[in-house]
Amino acid sequence: MTSDSPVGPPKGDTGAVQAVVLVGGKGTRLRPLTLSAPKPMLPTAGVPFLTHLLSRIKEAGVVDVVLGTSFQAHVFSEYYGDGSKLGLNLTYVTETEPLGTGGAIRNVLDELTADTILVFNGDVLGGTDVREVLATHRESGADVTMHLVSVSDPRAFGCVPTDETGRVTDFLEKTQDPPTDQINAGTYVFRRSVIEEIEPGRAVSVEREVFPKLLADGRHIQAHADHAYWRDMGTPEDFVRGSADLVRGIAPSPALGDRRGESLVHEGAGVAPGAVLIGGTVVGRGAEIGPRARLDGAVIFDGAVVEAGAVVERSIVGFGARLGPRALVRDTVIGDGADVGARCELLRGARVWPGIQIPDNGIRFSTDV
């Protein structure tokens, strides 16, 4: 890998750019789905979630990408290989112990040969134009540029105030009275020399250590703020919403081309007459949807079976799982290979672990059967 790898000329390009994608997390909030696969590899609108991000990076003209892996690292390399099928150069660096965001970035330094390094959090679904973020970095001459998005309720996040020129002035932890609605969106552009300054071999947080120290030292952190689509895909609710937004075209992804609609049914899936698929539902390869089933904002993984009259709303049904006739599944996660019996009702955040069998009428919220 060399610093003169082919890179497109986004807006005043001044040299090669490499990208780093951090995909080492265990995805505990999405269990039981992440017991068998890392979160970035879960099917999202029919392809691994990471593919949507990689396609955005490629669209921006950046082809050299380093994946910082840890949990089930082999899954990434086995699926993507050298990246050539996506038109990318992929390199893999594995953490042997958790290093935090800053430590993970420092851990891939030996693979970084460009002066400009894009860094992405691998569990964020975003719609901002990566070329615009790079342009902001180059035009401002910053040491680090940070993508910020405005959210309706910033109290749940750390917020990032800026001055009138867009220069970052502070990093604030979660507060009930935030001074700005701008939050850290998890995409950065670093000068390589700044990454060199991060202490190697220990856990380091960019938000709590690296960025505050840069500000304290008078270094230049520039914001690229916009109102682009943004969603942290870490919870089942957000995962379902993000998948549906991709299907419906609300969230952009070059990996899906021009396909958009109320549902996405993949090759080899069977949908019986009378079944209703709405709300950005995805039906995976080899899955079977029975007659009169109703799927609204559902994510059905490959090989799953939803039998006649079952209702699935805002829920994820894992690989090879089965929902019996007239089962009701709402705001729920069904693990791989689970078997949910007829007329069961699973509501409000229920999680069924892989391989579990629930008999007919085994769990009910209604009084009738």
Image (cartoon, rainbow, N blue to C red):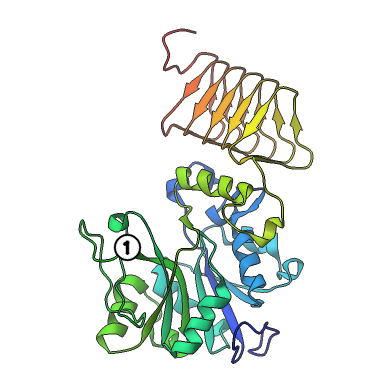
Q: Which residue is mark 1?
A: 181
Residue type indicated by callout 1: Asp
Specify whether residue 326 is in view. Answer: yes
Q: Residue at x 49, y 16 (%)?
A: 362
Tell me which corner region of the image, top left, top right, bottom left or bottom right, holds residue 179.
Answer: bottom left
Going by the image, does 135 lie left or right of 198? Answer: right
For label 1, the SS is loop
Specify whether residue 74 is in view. Answer: no
Q: Residue at x 31, y 70 (%)?
A: 160
Would you place residue 45 above or below residue 271 in this image?
below
Q: Please tell me which residue lies in front, 355 or 329.
A: 329
Q: Could you tell me residue 307's position as x and y percent? A: 66, 22
Q: Please tell me which residue lies in front, 40 or 144.
A: 144
Going by the image, does 368 lie left or right of 292? Answer: left
Going by the image, does 163 lie left or right of 132? Answer: left
Would you place residue 145 above or below residue 129 in this image?
below
